[in-house]
Image (spheres, rainbow, N blue to C red):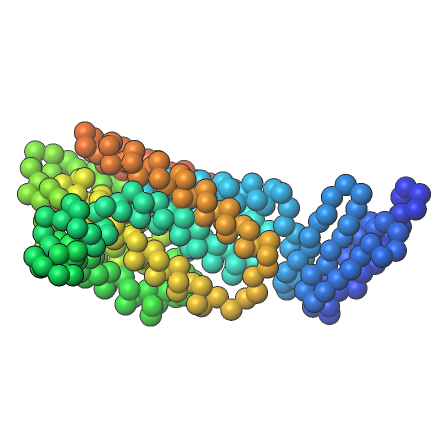
Amino acid sequence: MGGFPSGQREQTVNLPSTTSVVRIHLLPPKTVRSDPGSLFVFTESCDILISDIYEKRILILTFLDFIIAVIFGLVEGITEWLPISSTGHMILLNEFLKINVSEDFFSLYLVVIQLGAILAVVIVFWKDIWPFGIKDNPHPWKKEGFGRYVKADKFVMWFKVLVACVPAAIVGVLFDDLFDELFYNYVCVAISLILFGILFIVVENWIKDKKPHVRSEGEITYPMAFFIGACQLVAAVFPGTSRSGTTILGSISIGISREAAARFTFILAIPVMLGASLLKILKYDGDVKGSEVALLIVGMVVAFAVSFVVIKWLLAYIRKNSFKVFGWYRIALGTLVLLLGLFGVIGK
């Protein structure tokens, strides 16, 4: 291989036996140093980290990977709170944009960047979820002592949230990996998008002339909370249904106002998404490099910023509008996905 500038050379670097031989364009000697699992190559113009050797592949994290991480964070922040399925959009986005990491780490990445979105919910609803304080406490636990600092109505709300978490928590712990293997594909996502898009339109037409009898999350009963949790279970099994979509759809179908349904859904997301992220982290048995941690941080920060804006926008939007537009969007996107799969553009 001729044509190298003066003073440079071609060197063959033998990596561990599980990898292929790699040819690298190097500067003079002592420009390469390696440690187990990583190889650093220095040139005059840039430093490239070649890390995480998996199954005869060398994964190279570049500036482009971080740009893609920003895009994934952007999509997460938008789709997590709109009833259009964040997981479904992530799976579809991964068909076109791939971060150069292992499949196991990418699965971890999709769940962990949700932590940024959760933080946005905590900040937006802080006054509604924090159960302690003497100010703005019309329903203290007790009139004197420490009890007057306890907001009894907030504790009641959290108990209802915990009740709603039970169905998905049990099934998620027992069958999370099985559901990932069976249903995380574009066909399942497309069918779920279309079916629940149709359901949104049908339910909105059905309740059009009906007045909701529950107008705040505080009026939601324990049986209602459990029913909402059962609706959430559908999203835990089938990607493309949308966690927020199923809970909002179930809520408005039993007489809960759109705004109360959305607020309860957002608050319910806090323990559910924290639990899902923790479960993925505990089950992950691979190595995580510093560059991969950086990818996670980038995704979480972007998801947080975008989520903050989207949550406020959606709460304002549904005060005067229905969810029909999201139903039509889901149908259009699901149809497009099926066509792309049919013509071999995705799912190869």
Which residue is rendered at x = 54% and y = 43% of the image? 68
> Of 146 and 282, which appears nearest the observer?
146
Q: How many labels does the image show?
A: 0
**Above/below status of 73 relative to 153:** above
Residue most toward the top? Answer: 320
Decide if residue 225 is on the left or right side of residue 26: left
> How far from the left and from the top, in percent, is residue 83?
29, 42
Decide if residue 28 is on the left or right side of residue 238: right
Does residue 10 appear in the picture of this structure? yes
> How far from the left and from the top, in percent, is residue 330?
32, 39
Which residue is rendered at x = 22% and y = 41% of the image? 200
Residue most toward the right? Answer: 6
> How far from the left and from the top, in percent, is residue 16?
73, 68
Which residue is rendered at x = 29% and y = 52% of the image? 269
Does residue 253 appear in the picture of this structure? no
Which residue is rendered at x = 59% and y = 57% of the image? 290
> Of 331 and 343, which appears nearest the observer?
331
Decide if residue 218 is on the left or right side of residue 189: left
> How far from the left and from the top, in percent, is residue 148?
13, 56
**Above/below status of 221 relative to 331:** below
Decide if residue 144 is on the left or right side of residue 270: left
> Of 72 and 197, which appears nearest the observer?
72
Which image quadrant for residue 37?
A: bottom right
